[in-house]
Amino acid sequence: MHNKIDHFATGADTLDQGVAAMETALGVTVPRGGKHDAMSTHNCVMQSGNGSFFELIAIDPDAPADPGRVRWFTLDDPATQARLADRPRALCWVVGTDDLDGVIAASPVDLGEVVLFTRGERSWRLTVPKDGHLPMDGLLPAFIEWSPGPHPSTGQQDLGVTLDKVRLSHPEPDELSLVLKALHVDHLCSVTQGDAALSFALNTPKGAVVLD
């Protein structure tokens, strides 16, 4: 089983809000990406080093208001929407794997259903909890398995932003660490004690930046 950070997502009230905030925080303009028809969301994306990418995601106002299921990354949660109205927030990290079924079988917690998504000639399988909330207070990653082909980051712009570390804080850090270890992703993040919180430490043209 080979697991690595695939991408990480910061949510925004609107993409325009998110792009403006990232220009201020990171010193770059994150390019427009695509749409997720099954979730009524859209994004902006850029490379973030080591075959990974940064995703800025928001509800797509031009898509159907009800996609027929709860959106991922708690974007339908009123509490999340209120937080995003204030400013963009770190929402989720996604781990790429070459054995998604093996990850699910080994997981001590329910990672959600596996949903197949397609865009053009590419497809991917992703764990998506039915209520949109990731386990362990939203700190466990989603898991993704891409169809054969180059990683999507190879077609994205490199603007000099790289991920240094995914940071997790939790009231029960030992419990969280045990689950991360069982999922073979404990080497991909740091864990400290505190209120449940997710943040991304980045190297950027403006220096070291933490998005939370």
Image (cartoon, rainbow, N blue to C red):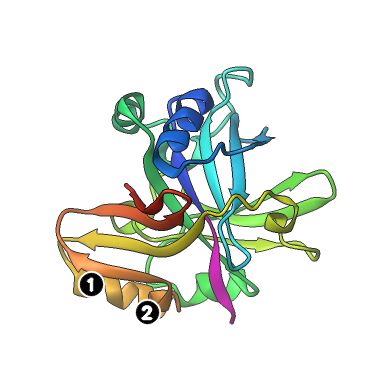
Residue in the image at 53% along x and 41% along y: 28
- The label number, if any, that marks residue 192 in the structure image: none
Image x and y of residue 174, in percent: 20, 75
From this viewpoint, is residue 149 visible? yes
Q: Amino acid at mark 2?
A: Lys
Above or below, 1 against 212 in this view is below
Residue in the image at 40% along x and 45% along y: 91
Front residue (pair 86, 181): 86
Image x and y of residue 22, in percent: 45, 37
Residue in the image at 31% along x and 70% along y: 190
Give the quarter of the figure containing the N terminus: bottom right
Q: Amino acid at mark 1?
A: Glu
Front residue (pair 50, 184): 50
Taking 182 as reference, is 5 left or right?
right
Taking 150 as reference, is 172 left or right?
left
Image x and y of residue 95, in percent: 52, 64
Taking 191 as reference, is 111 left or right?
right
| Residue range highlighted in magenta | 1-7
Residue 136 is inside the magenta segment:
no
- The label number, if any, that marks residue 175 in the structure image: 1
Furthest residue in direction right, as rendered? 121
| SS category of the residue bearing label 2 | helix
Which residue carries the number 2 mark?
181
